[in-house]
Amino acid sequence: MLRTKLNRPTNTADHLERPHLVELLEKNRHLPLILVSAPAGYGKSILISQWLEQKNNFGWLSIDESMNDAPTFVKYFTEGLSIACAAAASGLKNWEQENYFLKWEAIIDKVINKLNELKEPVRLILDDYHLIRNQEIHELISAIINEDITNFHLVIITRRDPPLRLRGLRLYHKMFELRAHDLKFDENDIRKLLAKERIVDFSDEELSDLYEQSEGWVLAIRIMLAARSFQMLEGNKGKSLTLSNDLDDLLVHISDKLDPKFFRQLQICSLCDQFSEELIDSVFSHAFQDSDSAAILLKKLRDLNFFLIPTSEDGTWYRFHHLIRDILKRQLEKNEPETINQLYIKISKWFSGKNIVDEAIRYAIKGNDYALASRQIISHRESILEKGQWWVLQRWLNNIPRQIRNTNIDLLLMELLVCEETWRIRDFSSILEILESVGIENSNDKNISLYLFHLGYFLTYINPNPKKATESLERSKALFHDDSYMFGGRRELILASSRQMLGLTALALQSLEEIRQKFDPSSQLHIRAIHGKVLVHLHSGNLEAANSDSNKLLFLVQDSELQYAKGWGSYFLGNIAFQWYNEYEAIHSLKGVLAFEGLFNLRVYFDALAGLALISSLQEDQEATALFLEQMCQLALKLKDTNFQNYCRSVQARVNWHAGQGDKELGWAEADWVKQHPSSYLFLIDVPELTKLRIVVSHGSRAQVEEAVAMLKEVEAMLESVHNHYQQIDLVLLRAMGYLRLGEKERAAKYLTEALILADKNDMVRPVVEVNRVMPDLFNLIAKTDAHNRLLSRIGIDSSSQKFLSVPTFKDNRLTTREQKVVELIAKGLQNKEVADQLHISTVTVKSHLTNIFKKLGVSNRTSMLRIIQDQRPLFKIQ
């Protein structure tokens, strides 16, 4: 971060005080927004700087092009707040890391909530806001303004109006604005300026001429005065000022009077958004044989009053007025186009040497030297990854064209890591192929080791082949020893997973335990070892051990900067609580995951949202369910990835399944439902392939159910081949449901008993709760004396007294499970409210069910409905 972007422009002695405008600003300081909108050169920034001269509790952000990147903007926004008030930025420090892939609305809510906590007035100035083109940033600023936050005020300085619905802000008196006509100098202002600069030989006619030509444009006035001063130096004292207000022409005129070497130095400085003595000395040493020092140059500029603006309080950093900079830069590009890129490259190298990496990469790209930008990314990758900040690498890589990335082994290896975290499966596979084609086997040992590490990841989680994965990972270890967090520690974690998939669970846990004991608890390798143990336990179906190690993981990272690990720890606890059907802990932990958006695997982030939607659905909290589904769908649309859209569709189908509307999802479920792959299952709360099996088993035709039951057996065998027991209870319960629908009650009872024993052993209640929601009749198969009745009683299922309608048969039965329950209760004489209370739903939902039932049965009232049900008693088997 270049901290000079957070400094207020320093007021210099030659600036004209504008008390009437300062008074207006002070009078309107309570409003959410002060907008200063005028073309370049009207003194906007200087005016606001004058107003704030004696004030505290403000932050200043000088915006540049790089801040169109949302995380970068949030980073600087947060730093600006911290300067204004340390408490204001508390809890926001990592948001630039957390929002890279995220639903922006969630970030907006967090910002507003934090700003609402302010105890004293804070003001943030956004200078050069016209450079912002990112609509998300405009949405953030608009939301802040419209929230009417008591102690937070924005000042926007811009050359053109921002897209913030200004008409409404004016209508509701939420803003004060100053424009060009307010800022321009009148003749009296010009007279004061002349007196301030001790120009006494100016006639009234010349002053009037100056005002007429400049039209009160402050910068034009200053340049015309500068041009006149050069005329005076040449002895044209009596000559009237006849120069136009064309600033390019005026600057050319001035340059004709200056030493060419000195003026070229000014042009070179214009390539820098901001510059210091050290920076321009470095650049001049490249551009000149006998250049004056930067100190001499800056002294001359100050003596000439040549539009130099200090950007640091200690006077070490400066910039030109933006318009002057643009003119100087255009002239250099016109006169020396062949040197521009070389100078940008020199600037880039200087920033790189100061470890200001974002600026270094930005100037390298400006200089079209992608090779240099790539080298800078490569040289800083380890320090970034040691902090777990893979998203920073992604931002840098996005600035390098694809054709260049595809020829650079180091960049491709970095991109594989990004693919793992963003779950870009197709890109992952193609990059592995590209690495083979560019000759990864001829690279150095470290790169080959990295390649084998990523190949091991691919063969563990994406295209499972644990034997080959283990071989690749062990070869990687043999080639290059590494104890880093994002490589060495991650490699041990994946190796443990691949060993567990081979059935070597004891070896996997032992290896991780040896690493844990070898390293100090505060070390990243120690933390990675615990992380790996959780994954091994989850795949093995050992939730108790997974929960214990998840708590250890979160305890160790609670005071660290490892946001990546904190996100995973919250996910693990939420995942386990979901399976245990501990509603409060599941919601609390999975909501905690949302605070770490973008910091870890995006597929897992989606899974956390899925868990929140599903647990809300099982609780029949329709509002919360809809909210989490909407978040999933919006993020899927933003990512434009069909995989994530499919995840969102799967959770929606499963929610409808809970609500007795699984028949509506049969069309979706029938598409590709027989395609099953072990990589889809892993340790995830929702798996689209499994959701399709759920729908087909409960609502498919007889032929489909028969095929689904056979498919479930294959899926069990497939997962057993990689020793994945995480979804075992779900699969056994689905087989029980399938056999019941096929009329094979004894086989259904056998699998139900097996599932309940497993559920009781692992305290894995959620699969049972979920199936009871959809097919409660299944539990009528359990005898009252069975020991596992304790589990059913504990979760509110009393199989000995259940009197549900029978399971829906195939084409003849047109009512869903929930609709059948509604009919049964009404047949007992219950009214709508009593039915609602029994089923824990609203009366509106009961009426909706009745409307659907009437439509399906072709009746218009309850009496006709009950008569048809009674006539079809053998079909519905009402008890």
Image (tube, grey):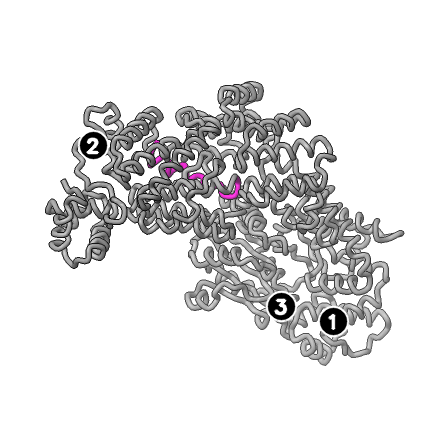
What distance separates the C-alpha of mark 3 from that of mark 1? 18 Å
Q: Dot 3, how many residues are within 10 Å of its Cα: few (below 14), some (14-19), or many (20+)? A: some
Q: Mark 2 or mark 3, which is nearer the start of the sequence?
A: 3
Q: Mark 1 or mark 2, which is nearer the start of the sequence?
A: 1
Q: Which residue is mark 2?
A: 799
Horizontal placement of 93 versus 739: left or right?
A: right
Horizontal placement of 856 versus 642: left or right?
A: left
Res 224 label: 1
Res 446 label: none
Location of residue 350 with respect to 217 vertically, above or below: above
The structure residue drawn at horizontal position 60% and vertical position 53%, both measured from the top left corner, is 67
Of labels 2 and 1, the one closer to you = 2
- Span of residues in magenta: 580-600
What distance separates the C-alpha of mark 3 from that of mark 2? 77 Å
SS class, disc 1? helix
- Percent position of residue 595, x then y: 46, 42
| Residue at far bottom of view | 205
Q: Which residue is mark 3?
A: 39
SS class, disc 3? loop
The structure residue drawn at horizontal position 13% and vertical position 49%, both measured from the top left corner, is 871
Quadrant, the N terminus = top right
- Percent position of residue 314, x then y: 68, 47
Location of residue 632 with respect to 791 vertically, above or below: below
- Tell me, yes or no, whether the highlighted magenta stretch contains residue 587: yes
Mark 1: which amino acid?
A: Met
Query: As rendered, which of 63 and 771 lies closer to the eye?
Result: 771
